[in-house]
Image (tube, helix red, strand yellow):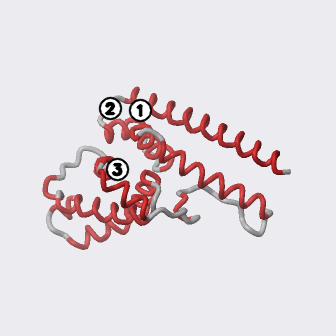
């Protein structure tokens, strides 16, 4: 980032190559739409480039990156026109966009197992998008991006205790909603037999 601050375009390109994919996964998990995520990643990197002269290294660069990304995502999601853009681009995520959810090998698993795994991955993404914003961000940064409690606290500008609480509530909410969905799914399956 310090090279970018000095105007080194190659350094910015290297930074983009290194972080654009993980950032896309983070943003996709946040907004639940690949096309919107791609556009937002471009906007985030543009913000970082424009603010390079103001960058002061206080911690890891990834903490700074995810703070900028989180703020940008929150601002975009809160805009009224975001919903229109999101709804018009509604699409199911590809396997690659599921963000680390490992699906069974098609040759090793039967069609039913593969279908169930894909259905669960899609439902989990839906439930993740429905979480309150602060819980979603904390969970994504911790479980999927590997940030520590302290790094998440820095990104969200909250205490480590607040991060632990957010993570606990997010996991609890996801678990409860997934169990409810599974029960409904099982009831539907048993009534159609």
State the image coordinates of residue 13 (x, y, percent, origin top left). 29, 71
| Residue behind mark 3 | 77
State the image coordinates of residue 17 (x, y, percent, origin top left). 36, 69
Crowd class of label 1 (few under 14; some 14 to 19; many from 20; radius 10 Å): many
Between tags 3 and 2, which lies in front? Answer: 3
- The picture quadrant where one finds residue 173 is top right
In this image, 184 relative to 100: left or right?
A: right
State the image coordinates of residue 95 (x, y, percent, origin top left). 58, 64
Residue lying furthest bottom: 10
| Residue behind mark 2 | 158
Q: Residue at x 51, y 64 (%)?
A: 91
Label 1 secondary element: helix
Mark 1 and mark 2 in contact? Answer it, CB < 8 Å. yes
Q: Nearer the viewer, residue 85 or 101?
A: 85
Between tags 3 and 1, which lies in front? Answer: 3
State the image coordinates of residue 126 (x, y, percent, origin top left). 54, 50
Q: Earlier in the sequence, mark 3 or mark 2?
A: 3
| Residue behind mark 1 | 163
Label 3 secondary element: helix
Asked whether residue 5 is in view, the answer is yes
Tell me the distance, in whole angstroms, between the alpha carbons under discs 3 and 1. Answer: 21 Å
Mark 3 and mark 1 in contact? Answer it, CB < 8 Å. no
């Amino acid at each position: 980032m310090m090279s970018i601050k000095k105007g080194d375009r190659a350094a910015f390109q290297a930074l983009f190559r290194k972080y654009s994919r993980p950032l896309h996964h983070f943003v996709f998990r946040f907004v639940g739409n690949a096309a919107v995520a791609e556009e937002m990643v471009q906007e985030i990197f543009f913000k970082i480039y424009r603010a390079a002269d103001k960058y002061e290294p206080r911690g890891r660069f990834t903490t700074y990156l995810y703070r900028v990304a989180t703020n940008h995502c929150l601002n975009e999601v809160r805009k009224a026109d975001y919903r229109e853009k999101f709804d018009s681009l509604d699409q199911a995520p590809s396997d690659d966009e599921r963000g680390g959810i490992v699906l069974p090998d098609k040759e090793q698993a039967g069609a039913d197992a593969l279908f169930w795994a894909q259905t669960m991955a899609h439902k989990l993404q839906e439930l993740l998008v429905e979480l309150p914003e602060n819980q979603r961000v904390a969970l994504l940064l911790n479980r999927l991006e590997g940030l520590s409690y302290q790094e998440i606290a820095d990104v969200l500008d909250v205490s480590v205790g607040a991060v632990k609480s957010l993570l606990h509530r997010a996991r609890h909410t996801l678990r409860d909603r997934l169990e409810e969905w599974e029960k409904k799914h099982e009831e539907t399956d048993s009534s159609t037999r």
